Amino acid sequence: MQRQRYIAVLSAFLASLLAAGLLFAQAPAPTPDTVVLADKKEKTGQVAKETYKELSLQDAKGGTETIQWANIADVRYGDRPGSCISGDSAFSRGDYAQALEGYRQVVADVDGNKARAIFRQHGLIGVARSLVALRKHDDAVKAFNDLLTKEPDSRFLRDAHLGIVAALRAKGDAAGATNAITRAATEAKSKSLEEEFSIRLTLLKAGLLEDDKKWADAQNEYSSIARKADKYPVLSAAAKIGLGRSMLNVGQDQKAMAHFTELQNAASSNRYLLCGALSGLGDCAFAAGEKSKQPNDYRTALGYYVKAGVIGFPGKGEPSAEHERALFMAGCAYQALSTVYTEEQAKRFFAKRAELAFRELIAEYPASTYVDPAGKRLKEVLVTAGAAEEQ
């Protein structure tokens, strides 16, 4: 009888614990991730995998759905590491050294099983981008390669290849950048990447030809891209803008001016194309100024560059290359005006404006290919402005 009472009491006690959730308590379920689709609909679950092709989302019942990146507008992670969030915050405010620490901690958190494995590639790409922003080009190349080695099918595969080319180009290693383009093109073919990525690589190749002053070869590349890139508005615009610059550089001044005027008239709502067209017209006026050494030509060029900079100011996620170039060339026009005027006050005025333009470019776009030439010109205008001691 006592044994039965004991069992009854124990059973009641265990039942109370179960009711209170204190027996066999489970760890709280992770906060679900949310995938926002291009049509604004949302799907929740846990992101199990992210590759260059698609995202795999696991639902509460263990089922898995794969979603192509082309159909995804955004991904909100329920348990994104705090180190990743702090890295993003530091990067957005321009504190790239702090961002670098944050992203390195993300990788350490994953390796220490403190964060999900999918976040390793987020940390690795953040490390590489921070090094680019810090102008540590060799280290950036190593970091991008580290990502490609550890996460060969990463969602950031394209960014890593493009980043390697950009870093090598920025440090002046044209041969290395060319080899990197060839490597990326080979992988693009083996993994059946989309045509858009191949066109991006060809644009980079054309840019390298411009850097090397092989204007005719660059003109041929840009012309080829312009003919086949119509369904990619930004890439098509970049090719058409580059084609106009190449015309100007091979001495086809009038043809280049007509080309840029046509682009300006056809730009419509394509702000990137309009920005490039205005800068191209500025280049035509600047080239005339280099021949005439007349202030009016440089002033005309300056007007185009300033207008291009305002119209082409990029929104979040939009390409900034033409805006960067407009800033740089505005600085060059101001600098040119500081040399053609003889009055000391005018020289100092325009030199100061050139200084501000170059400083803005360097501060806002630390990874830009125009940072190094802007830095060299900045030293020159500081002397003209009588402020060399500020450098």
Image (cartoon, rainbow, N blue to C red):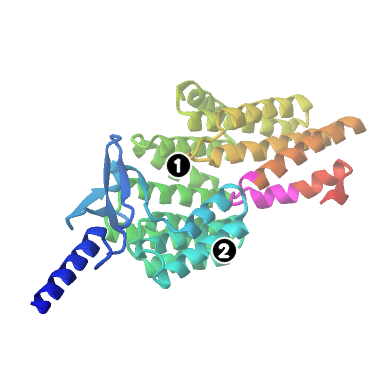
- For the residues labelled 2 and 1, the Cα–Cα distance comes to 40 Å
Q: Earlier in the sequence, mark 2 or mark 1?
A: 2
Does residue 29 belong to the magenta stretch?
no
Does residue 367 belong to the magenta stretch?
yes
* Quadrant in the picture for the N terminus: bottom left
Q: Which residues are magenta?
A: 364-377
Tell me, for residue 101, which label it has, or none. 2
| Along the line of sight, the residue nearer the viewer: 18 or 229 | 18
Residue on which disc 1 sits: 222
Extreme residue toward the bottom, this view: 3
| Along the line of sight, the residue nearer the viewer: 197 or 47 | 47
**Label 1: element kind:** helix
Q: Is residue 194 visible?
A: yes
| 7 w.r.t. 129: above or below | below
Extreme residue toward the front, this view: 1
Q: Amino acid at mark 1?
A: Tyr
Where is residue 216 shown, x and y percent of the image? 51, 45
Residue 287 sits in quarter: top right
152 left or right, relative to 203: left
Where is residue 91 shown, x and y percent of the image? 56, 52
